[in-house]
Image (cartoon, helix red, strand yellow):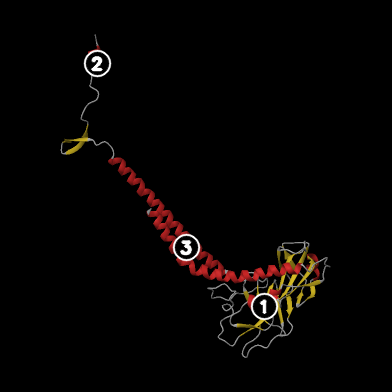
Amino acid sequence: MEVKCQALTMLILLITLSWPVIESLSDNITEIETARVLDAVLQNYAYTALVNPKTGVSYDADVPKNLTGVQISALRLRTGSLFARGVPMYKEFKISIGVIAQPYVERLVLVYQNLGNRSETYYSLPGYIYLTPVLGLLAYDGTDVSPGNRPELEIRASKEPVSIDFGSVKPAPNGSNPMCVWVDLHGHVNFTSVVSGNRCFTFKQGHFSIVAKSNSKSVPPSMSPSLVPPATSEAVKPDRNGGTDSRVWRSVISAVGGCVLVFLAVLALSIRGYNKRKKTRKMERAAESGEPLHTTMVGGMKAPTAMVTRTQPTLETEYVP
Protein backbone atom coordinates (compact mmCIF):
# COMPACT_ATOMS: atom_id res chain seq x y z
CA MET A 1 0.00 0.00 0.00
CA GLU A 2 2.85 2.34 0.86
CA VAL A 3 4.63 1.83 -2.47
CA LYS A 4 1.39 2.42 -4.36
CA CYS A 5 0.91 5.76 -2.63
CA GLN A 6 4.48 6.77 -3.45
CA ALA A 7 4.05 5.77 -7.11
CA LEU A 8 0.78 7.71 -7.35
CA THR A 9 2.40 10.77 -5.79
CA MET A 10 5.30 10.67 -8.25
CA LEU A 11 2.91 10.22 -11.20
CA ILE A 12 0.85 13.23 -10.16
CA LEU A 13 4.05 15.28 -9.75
CA LEU A 14 5.28 14.21 -13.20
CA ILE A 15 1.99 15.15 -14.88
CA THR A 16 1.91 18.50 -13.06
CA LEU A 17 5.43 19.43 -14.16
CA SER A 18 4.99 18.37 -17.80
CA TRP A 19 1.39 19.55 -18.31
CA PRO A 20 2.26 23.07 -19.60
CA VAL A 21 4.48 21.54 -22.28
CA ILE A 22 1.87 18.91 -23.22
CA GLU A 23 -0.88 21.53 -23.34
CA SER A 24 1.10 23.90 -25.60
CA LEU A 25 2.06 21.07 -27.91
CA SER A 26 -1.52 19.81 -28.16
CA ASP A 27 -2.74 23.28 -29.17
CA ASN A 28 -0.03 23.51 -31.83
CA ILE A 29 -0.72 20.03 -33.16
CA THR A 30 -4.44 20.75 -33.41
CA GLU A 31 -3.85 23.69 -35.75
CA ILE A 32 -1.35 21.76 -37.86
CA GLU A 33 -3.69 18.78 -38.12
CA THR A 34 -6.53 21.04 -39.28
CA ALA A 35 -4.41 22.26 -42.18
CA ARG A 36 -3.30 18.72 -42.98
CA VAL A 37 -6.90 17.51 -43.05
CA LEU A 38 -7.63 20.30 -45.55
CA ASP A 39 -4.75 19.03 -47.73
CA ALA A 40 -6.25 15.53 -47.76
CA VAL A 41 -9.70 16.85 -48.67
CA LEU A 42 -8.37 19.02 -51.49
CA GLN A 43 -6.27 16.14 -52.82
CA ASN A 44 -9.36 13.95 -53.01
CA TYR A 45 -11.34 16.60 -54.91
CA ALA A 46 -8.40 17.35 -57.22
CA TYR A 47 -8.27 13.71 -58.30
CA THR A 48 -11.91 13.87 -59.40
CA ALA A 49 -10.75 16.00 -62.35
CA LEU A 50 -8.29 13.32 -63.52
CA VAL A 51 -10.59 11.34 -65.82
CA ASN A 52 -8.39 9.79 -68.52
CA PRO A 53 -5.81 12.52 -67.90
CA LYS A 54 -3.08 13.40 -70.33
CA THR A 55 0.44 13.57 -68.99
CA GLY A 56 1.65 17.12 -68.49
CA VAL A 57 -1.82 18.72 -68.71
CA SER A 58 -3.30 20.47 -65.65
CA TYR A 59 -6.94 19.93 -64.76
CA ASP A 60 -8.92 22.33 -62.56
CA ALA A 61 -11.32 20.76 -60.06
CA ASP A 62 -14.34 21.97 -58.11
CA VAL A 63 -14.45 22.24 -54.34
CA PRO A 64 -17.45 21.82 -51.99
CA LYS A 65 -19.57 24.84 -51.11
CA ASN A 66 -18.08 25.17 -47.64
CA LEU A 67 -14.69 25.86 -49.32
CA THR A 68 -15.93 28.47 -51.77
CA GLY A 69 -13.05 30.74 -52.76
CA VAL A 70 -10.47 27.94 -52.80
CA GLN A 71 -9.02 26.90 -56.17
CA ILE A 72 -7.35 23.54 -56.86
CA SER A 73 -5.78 21.84 -59.84
CA ALA A 74 -4.04 18.53 -60.59
CA LEU A 75 -1.12 17.82 -62.90
CA ARG A 76 0.01 14.26 -63.66
CA LEU A 77 3.64 13.71 -64.63
CA ARG A 78 6.20 10.99 -65.10
CA THR A 79 8.70 11.15 -62.27
CA GLY A 80 11.64 10.81 -64.67
CA SER A 81 10.30 13.60 -66.88
CA LEU A 82 9.88 15.88 -63.86
CA PHE A 83 13.52 15.33 -62.92
CA ALA A 84 14.87 15.75 -66.46
CA ARG A 85 12.67 18.58 -67.76
CA GLY A 86 10.87 20.19 -64.85
CA VAL A 87 7.67 22.16 -65.52
CA PRO A 88 8.06 25.53 -67.29
CA MET A 89 4.93 26.93 -65.63
CA TYR A 90 2.24 25.34 -63.47
CA LYS A 91 -0.03 28.16 -62.34
CA GLU A 92 2.29 30.46 -60.33
CA PHE A 93 4.99 27.78 -59.96
CA LYS A 94 8.01 27.36 -62.21
CA ILE A 95 9.54 23.97 -61.43
CA SER A 96 13.21 23.64 -62.29
CA ILE A 97 14.95 20.48 -63.51
CA GLY A 98 16.41 18.09 -60.95
CA VAL A 99 13.33 17.67 -58.72
CA ILE A 100 13.53 14.36 -56.84
CA ALA A 101 10.46 12.49 -55.53
CA GLN A 102 10.67 10.12 -52.56
CA PRO A 103 9.61 7.37 -52.37
CA TYR A 104 10.06 6.75 -56.06
CA VAL A 105 6.94 6.12 -58.14
CA GLU A 106 6.64 5.96 -61.91
CA ARG A 107 3.96 8.66 -62.03
CA LEU A 108 3.04 11.40 -59.60
CA VAL A 109 0.40 14.11 -59.33
CA LEU A 110 1.16 17.70 -58.31
CA VAL A 111 -1.84 19.23 -56.54
CA TYR A 112 -2.04 23.02 -56.68
CA GLN A 113 -3.92 25.02 -54.03
CA ASN A 114 -4.97 28.65 -53.90
CA LEU A 115 -6.64 29.19 -50.54
CA GLY A 116 -7.88 32.69 -51.45
CA ASN A 117 -9.94 34.22 -48.65
CA ARG A 118 -9.40 31.09 -46.54
CA SER A 119 -5.68 31.73 -46.18
CA GLU A 120 -5.78 33.26 -42.69
CA THR A 121 -8.30 30.64 -41.53
CA TYR A 122 -5.92 27.74 -42.03
CA TYR A 123 -2.55 29.53 -41.78
CA SER A 124 -2.85 32.29 -39.20
CA LEU A 125 0.23 34.45 -38.61
CA PRO A 126 -0.40 36.77 -35.64
CA GLY A 127 1.36 40.09 -36.11
CA TYR A 128 1.41 39.75 -39.90
CA ILE A 129 -0.97 40.46 -42.76
CA TYR A 130 -1.19 38.57 -46.02
CA LEU A 131 -0.32 40.51 -49.15
CA THR A 132 -1.15 37.53 -51.38
CA PRO A 133 -3.24 34.39 -50.97
CA VAL A 134 -1.59 31.25 -49.66
CA LEU A 135 -0.54 28.96 -52.51
CA GLY A 136 0.12 25.27 -51.99
CA LEU A 137 2.05 22.70 -54.01
CA LEU A 138 2.00 19.07 -52.85
CA ALA A 139 2.95 15.79 -54.53
CA TYR A 140 1.05 12.50 -54.39
CA ASP A 141 1.33 9.02 -55.87
CA GLY A 142 -0.11 9.12 -59.39
CA THR A 143 -0.22 5.39 -60.08
CA ASP A 144 -3.94 5.34 -59.33
CA VAL A 145 -5.81 8.55 -60.15
CA SER A 146 -9.26 7.51 -59.00
CA PRO A 147 -10.70 9.69 -56.19
CA GLY A 148 -9.50 8.74 -52.73
CA ASN A 149 -6.69 9.44 -50.32
CA ARG A 150 -3.38 8.71 -52.06
CA PRO A 151 0.10 8.39 -50.49
CA GLU A 152 1.87 11.70 -50.12
CA LEU A 153 5.34 12.06 -51.63
CA GLU A 154 8.25 14.27 -50.69
CA ILE A 155 9.69 16.34 -53.51
CA ARG A 156 12.94 18.27 -53.32
CA ALA A 157 14.75 20.45 -55.83
CA SER A 158 18.31 19.15 -56.02
CA LYS A 159 19.71 21.84 -58.36
CA GLU A 160 17.89 25.14 -58.85
CA PRO A 161 15.02 26.21 -56.55
CA VAL A 162 11.38 26.28 -57.56
CA SER A 163 10.20 29.85 -58.15
CA ILE A 164 6.76 31.21 -57.28
CA ASP A 165 5.63 34.27 -59.22
CA PHE A 166 2.71 35.80 -57.36
CA GLY A 167 0.39 38.02 -59.35
CA SER A 168 -0.69 41.27 -57.77
CA VAL A 169 0.75 41.96 -54.34
CA LYS A 170 -1.02 44.28 -51.92
CA PRO A 171 1.03 47.21 -50.64
CA ALA A 172 2.71 46.65 -47.30
CA PRO A 173 1.85 48.86 -44.31
CA ASN A 174 4.06 51.87 -43.72
CA GLY A 175 7.35 50.86 -42.19
CA SER A 176 7.00 47.18 -43.13
CA ASN A 177 8.79 45.24 -45.83
CA PRO A 178 7.20 42.33 -47.75
CA MET A 179 8.59 38.90 -46.88
CA CYS A 180 8.17 35.47 -48.41
CA VAL A 181 6.74 32.94 -45.99
CA TRP A 182 6.86 29.17 -46.37
CA VAL A 183 4.97 26.75 -44.10
CA ASP A 184 6.26 23.21 -44.48
CA LEU A 185 4.21 20.06 -43.98
CA HIS A 186 5.17 19.92 -40.28
CA GLY A 187 3.89 23.43 -39.56
CA HIS A 188 7.28 25.14 -39.33
CA VAL A 189 7.30 28.71 -40.63
CA ASN A 190 10.23 30.08 -42.64
CA PHE A 191 10.80 33.67 -43.81
CA THR A 192 12.93 34.72 -46.80
CA SER A 193 13.33 37.84 -48.92
CA VAL A 194 11.04 38.76 -51.78
CA VAL A 195 12.74 38.98 -55.19
CA SER A 196 11.60 41.44 -57.88
CA GLY A 197 8.63 42.49 -55.77
CA ASN A 198 6.52 39.35 -56.20
CA ARG A 199 8.77 36.28 -56.44
CA CYS A 200 9.70 33.68 -53.86
CA PHE A 201 11.89 30.58 -54.00
CA THR A 202 11.70 27.15 -52.35
CA PHE A 203 13.47 23.81 -52.47
CA LYS A 204 10.57 21.81 -51.03
CA GLN A 205 6.80 21.54 -51.21
CA GLY A 206 4.40 23.23 -48.81
CA HIS A 207 2.39 26.46 -48.64
CA PHE A 208 3.66 29.87 -49.67
CA SER A 209 2.66 33.53 -49.53
CA ILE A 210 3.97 37.08 -49.20
CA VAL A 211 3.33 38.80 -45.88
CA ALA A 212 4.29 41.93 -43.99
CA LYS A 213 4.29 42.95 -40.35
CA SER A 214 1.14 44.71 -39.29
CA ASN A 215 1.16 48.12 -37.64
CA SER A 216 0.25 46.53 -34.33
CA LYS A 217 2.94 45.47 -31.88
CA SER A 218 4.99 42.85 -33.62
CA VAL A 219 7.31 40.13 -32.40
CA PRO A 220 10.24 38.40 -34.07
CA PRO A 221 9.31 36.17 -37.01
CA SER A 222 10.42 33.04 -35.19
CA MET A 223 7.94 33.66 -32.37
CA SER A 224 4.89 35.25 -33.91
CA PRO A 225 3.38 32.54 -36.14
CA SER A 226 1.02 30.30 -34.21
CA LEU A 227 2.16 27.34 -36.28
CA VAL A 228 5.71 27.55 -34.94
CA PRO A 229 6.40 25.19 -32.00
CA PRO A 230 6.18 27.25 -28.78
CA ALA A 231 8.78 27.79 -26.07
CA THR A 232 11.63 28.52 -28.46
CA SER A 233 13.98 31.46 -28.31
CA GLU A 234 15.75 30.76 -31.60
CA ALA A 235 14.56 31.53 -35.10
CA VAL A 236 13.64 28.61 -37.32
CA LYS A 237 16.42 28.54 -39.86
CA PRO A 238 15.77 27.18 -43.37
CA ASP A 239 18.58 25.60 -45.35
CA ARG A 240 19.05 24.82 -49.00
CA ASN A 241 17.29 21.49 -48.65
CA GLY A 242 14.33 23.01 -46.85
CA GLY A 243 15.31 21.60 -43.46
CA THR A 244 14.47 23.32 -40.17
CA ASP A 245 15.99 23.48 -36.73
CA SER A 246 14.46 20.68 -34.66
CA ARG A 247 16.41 21.42 -31.48
CA VAL A 248 13.27 22.73 -29.79
CA TRP A 249 11.47 19.44 -30.26
CA ARG A 250 14.50 17.47 -29.08
CA SER A 251 14.69 19.62 -25.94
CA VAL A 252 11.01 19.05 -25.15
CA ILE A 253 11.28 15.31 -25.74
CA SER A 254 14.44 15.13 -23.63
CA ALA A 255 12.77 17.01 -20.76
CA VAL A 256 9.70 14.77 -20.75
CA GLY A 257 11.87 11.66 -21.15
CA GLY A 258 14.04 12.75 -18.23
CA CYS A 259 10.98 13.15 -16.00
CA VAL A 260 9.80 9.66 -16.97
CA LEU A 261 13.21 8.14 -16.21
CA VAL A 262 13.34 9.84 -12.80
CA PHE A 263 9.85 8.57 -12.03
CA LEU A 264 10.78 5.00 -13.01
CA ALA A 265 13.98 5.12 -10.95
CA VAL A 266 12.15 6.33 -7.83
CA LEU A 267 9.46 3.70 -8.38
CA ALA A 268 12.09 0.93 -8.70
CA LEU A 269 13.85 2.03 -5.49
CA SER A 270 10.53 2.19 -3.64
CA ILE A 271 9.61 -1.34 -4.75
CA ARG A 272 13.06 -2.63 -3.75
CA GLY A 273 12.81 -1.06 -0.29
CA TYR A 274 9.29 -2.39 0.16
CA ASN A 275 10.33 -5.94 -0.71
CA LYS A 276 13.29 -5.73 1.70
CA ARG A 277 11.09 -4.52 4.56
CA LYS A 278 8.53 -7.21 3.77
CA LYS A 279 11.20 -9.94 3.92
CA THR A 280 12.52 -8.63 7.24
CA ARG A 281 9.04 -8.60 8.82
CA LYS A 282 8.47 -12.15 7.58
CA MET A 283 11.66 -13.35 9.26
CA GLU A 284 10.70 -11.57 12.49
CA ARG A 285 7.27 -13.22 12.53
CA ALA A 286 8.86 -16.62 11.91
CA ALA A 287 11.24 -16.07 14.80
CA GLU A 288 8.45 -14.98 17.14
CA SER A 289 6.24 -17.96 16.32
CA GLY A 290 9.01 -20.61 16.93
CA GLU A 291 9.29 -22.79 20.04
CA PRO A 292 11.20 -20.95 22.82
CA LEU A 293 14.33 -22.62 24.17
CA HIS A 294 14.94 -23.04 27.90
CA THR A 295 18.01 -21.35 29.27
CA THR A 296 20.29 -21.95 32.21
CA MET A 297 23.16 -20.07 33.81
CA VAL A 298 26.57 -21.25 32.68
CA GLY A 299 29.16 -19.26 34.51
CA GLY A 300 28.10 -15.65 34.18
CA MET A 301 25.91 -15.99 31.04
CA LYS A 302 22.67 -17.62 29.93
CA ALA A 303 22.80 -20.47 27.46
CA PRO A 304 20.03 -22.59 25.89
CA THR A 305 19.61 -26.05 27.36
CA ALA A 306 17.40 -29.10 26.76
CA MET A 307 15.06 -30.06 29.59
CA VAL A 308 14.81 -33.78 28.82
CA THR A 309 17.27 -36.15 27.25
CA ARG A 310 15.30 -38.06 24.63
CA THR A 311 17.68 -41.05 24.33
CA GLN A 312 19.22 -42.56 27.42
CA PRO A 313 22.85 -43.63 27.05
CA THR A 314 23.43 -47.35 27.02
CA LEU A 315 26.78 -49.07 27.76
CA GLU A 316 27.92 -51.55 25.22
CA THR A 317 28.86 -54.02 27.96
CA GLU A 318 25.17 -54.44 28.85
CA TYR A 319 24.63 -56.43 25.65
CA VAL A 320 27.54 -58.78 26.32
CA PRO A 321 26.26 -62.19 27.52
Spot occupied by residue 290 in the image (x, y as percentages of width and height): 28, 37
Residue under pointer 2? 316
The amino acid type found where label 2 is placed reads Glu
| Element marked by disc 1 | helix
Residue under pointer 3? 259
The quarter of the image holding the C terminus is top left
| Element marked by disc 2 | helix
The amino acid type found where label 3 is placed reads Cys
Q: Dividing the picture into quarters, in which one does residue 283 lie? A: top left
The answer to which of marks 3 and 2 sits earlier in the sequence is: 3
- Of residues 289 and 251, the one nearer the viewer is 289
The answer to which of marks 3 and 1 sits earlier in the sequence is: 1
- Of residues 74 and 117, the one nearer the viewer is 117
- Left or right relative to 315: residue 278: right
The nearer-to-camera label among 2 and 1 is 1
Dots 2, 1 in contact, CB < 8 A: no
The amino acid type found where label 1 is placed reads Arg
- Left or right relative to 79: residue 264: left
Query: Which class describes the residues within 10 Å of circle 3: few (<14), some (14-19), or many (20+)?
Result: some
Label 3 and label 1: CA atoms lie apart by: 41 Å
Residue under pointer 1? 118
- Left or right relative to 260: residue 108: right
